[in-house]
Image: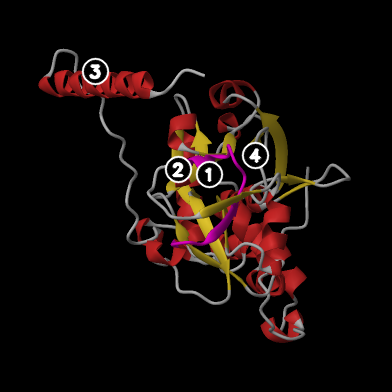
Amino acid sequence: MTRQRIFTLATALLVAGGLAGCSIGPVNLDDFFGTPSVEEAREARRAEQAPVVADAALKQSGTLTVGIPAAQTAPLAITTASGTQTGIDIDMAYALADELGLSTVSFVAVDDVDDALADTCDIVMGVEPDEAGEAAVVGGYVQNAAGLFTRGDVTAPVDASALDGATVGLQEGSVSAVTVDDFDLSITRTPFSNLNDAFEALEEGSVQYVVCDAYAGAYLAAAYSDVSFAGTFDEPTLVGVAIADAELQTAVQSALETIQTNGVADIARARWVGDLPTLTTESVITGLVERTEEAEPEEGSEAEDEAAAETDGAAAETGDAAAETPAE
């Protein structure tokens, strides 16, 4: 499948700026670049850039066949009502194809990374290292973490004390909600069936915070002018590109480094998650205290004997109290 690429820098800046809520005003891209025009520059670049991988390393000659995990969600991968795929994974795949000198990109849905790389695709987007099986994962163009969002301008990460007594919207049973359970927090949990309702409640002021996947939250937060990212609860996990072929791995690693250095990757992210920063250990909410559970006393230990004695004493007192109660 071929497609008009979005990754000429000025064009992408225009798109990213609009979606991120930045007001940059109307821009005539030909005036911005001068002569030749943007489209002419695109065509010249494609003509000059020869493929950097041999056809033998590809499933289809001259084509980068890209696997998208079937369970992938917005904003990494979105299927529109017309069946078209879009999202960060898709934009990044086209950017990689540009750097690899391949003019055609084909997408396939995958369930198992190893099987897909062996049979149907060259690379799989949006894979964490522990999901890759025998494949190598290169890059880290997005990060996975449980994020915190609030109204107003805040400097992320906030301190955990800001959550004391706060009303927090979340999806019970979600990965993010389970992550919050790991910490000793004095919060009032307000459950929602979906994140859209949670962010509506945040906008209306019925909750003070929303906890959810950081990228999903940033994607939804872009629709509101006064919702801000406030930090993560856990250390982010890098999400990259899974590859099995050694030659292709080297080429894709180099291509990723190029688009992460020249700003193209940042532009692709900004198109979907606005000004969400790259998540690192510095993004973690400060002052979080992990919840601790009392350990069960070991069998035969002194602590167990003392606990048993206390239980027996309490039972005896209960019996005495019952004996003093007149029968009706």
* CA–CA distance in space, label 4 to label 1: 19 Å
Residues at marks 4 and 3, CA–CA distance in whole angstroms: 55 Å
Q: Which mark is residue 267?
A: none
Instruction: Evaluate if marks 3 and 1 touch, with contact meaning CB atoms under 8 Å apart.
Output: no
The residue identified by callout 4 is: 72
Within-10-Å neighbours for mark 4: few <14, some 14–19, many 20+: some
Residue at which label 3 appears = 312
**Residue type highlighted by circle 2:** Asp
**Tag 4's secondary structure?**
loop
19 with respect to 319 (left or right): right
Q: How many marks?
A: 4
Relative horizontal placement of residue 176, taking residue 120 as reference (left or right): left
Secondary structure state at the residue bearing disc 2: loop
Dot label at residue 181: 2
Mark toward the start of the polypeptide (2 vs 3): 2
Hey, what amino acid is under mark 4?
Gln
**Nearer mark to the viewer, of 4 and 3:** 3
Tell me residue 20's x, y (percent): 66, 71
Q: Which residues are magenta?
A: 164-179
* Cβ–Cβ under 8 Å for marks 2 and 1: yes
User: Residue 106 or 38: which is nearer the viewer?
Assistant: 106
Q: Nearer the viewer, mark 3 or mark 1?
A: 3
